[in-house]
């Protein structure tokens, strides 16, 4: 089992609220409400304190490595120092990554980030301005990420489109039209991406 094939943590909200109050001083003696947010492999909650301040609680999948979460925190903190992008980057609120035990006794790492008010891209009306803004921020983000170094960032990640050579070893698993689609994508990658990297 891996992080990509496992189920997200199973969380009891009341237990989580008690745990948060016991583990974070800024939540002590506060009225807390939790709302689950969409997530794929982990559990994320919007936390409201006294119906005002909002934060995001990120509870990792049990297969997530602490080093990778430390990398994420490092990247977020580094990007918050960049005036070109910091307004769309959350802030790291927690001092250290803590461990919560979920309902099936799996240890899960917990982090707290600031909440950025806004509308989900998928729920927004598509406009030229929105597309240009998204493209601009994606470019700025890519540029700012180029100079960040962290030991956990240097790893093999099969879903990284800049390193698709591993597909060649598995191309014979597919037959006829399905194989043609994959072969075509691989050829385009070799022609357009690899050629321009050289």
Image: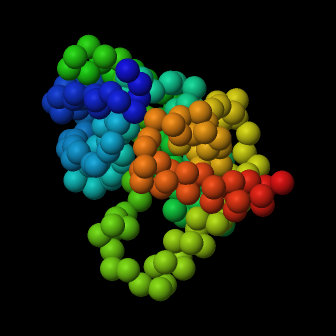
Colour treatment of the image: rainbow
Q: Please, is residue 131 above or below residue 97 in the view?
A: below
Residue 148 relative to residue 172: left or right: right
Q: Quadrant of residue 63?
A: top left
Q: Nearer the viewer, residue 50 or 178?
A: 178
Q: Nearer the viewer, residue 86 or 157?
A: 157
Q: Residue at x 26, y 13 (%)?
A: 105
Q: Please, is residue 102 above or below residue 80 in the view?
A: above
Q: Position of residue 123 (x, y in %)?
A: 29, 69
Q: Position of residue 53 (x, y in %)?
A: 33, 53
Q: Residue at x 47, y 86 (%)?
A: 128
Q: Position of residue 62 (x, y in %)?
A: 37, 23
As drawn, the residue found furthest toward the bottom would be 128
Residue 95 relative to residue 114: left or right: right
| Numbered circles on residues, count | 0
Q: Quadrant of residue 7?
A: top left
Q: Residue at x 20, y 20 (%)?
A: 103
Residue 140 relative to residue 52: left or right: right
Q: Residue at x 65, y 35 (%)?
A: 153
As drawn, the residue found furthest toward the right would be 198
Quadrant housing the N terminus: top left
Residue 61 relative to residue 89: left or right: left
Quadrant housing the C terminus: bottom right
| Res 75 visible | no
Q: Please, is residue 185 above or below residue 27 in the view?
A: below
| Res 89 visible | yes
Q: Position of residue 100 (x, y in %)?
A: 33, 22
As drawn, the residue found furthest toward the top would be 105
């Amino acid at each position: 089992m891996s992080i990509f094939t496992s189920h997200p943590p199973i969380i009891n909200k009341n237990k989580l609220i008690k745990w948060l109050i016991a583990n974070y001083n800024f939540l002590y003696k506060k009225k807390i409400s939790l709302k689950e947010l969409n997530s794929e492999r982990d559990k994320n909650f919007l936390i409201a304190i006294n119906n005002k301040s909002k934060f995001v609680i990120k509870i990792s999948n049990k297969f997530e490595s602490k080093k990778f979460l430390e990398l994420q925190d490092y990247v977020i903190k580094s990007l918050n120092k960049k005036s070109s992008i910091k307004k769309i980057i959350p802030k790291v609120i927690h001092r250290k990554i803590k461990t919560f035990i979920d309902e099936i006794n799996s240890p899960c790492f917990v982090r707290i980030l600031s909440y950025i008010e806004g509308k989900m891209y998928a729920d927004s009306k598509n406009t030229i301005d929105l597309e240009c803004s998204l493209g601009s921020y994606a470019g700025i983000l890519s540029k700012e990420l180029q100079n960040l170094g962290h030991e956990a960032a240097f790893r093999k990640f099969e879903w990284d489109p800049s390193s698709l050579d591993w597909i060649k070893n598995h191309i014979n698993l597919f037959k006829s039209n399905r194989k043609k689609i994959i072969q075509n994508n691989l050829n385009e990658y070799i022609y357009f991406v690899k050629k321009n990297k050289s």
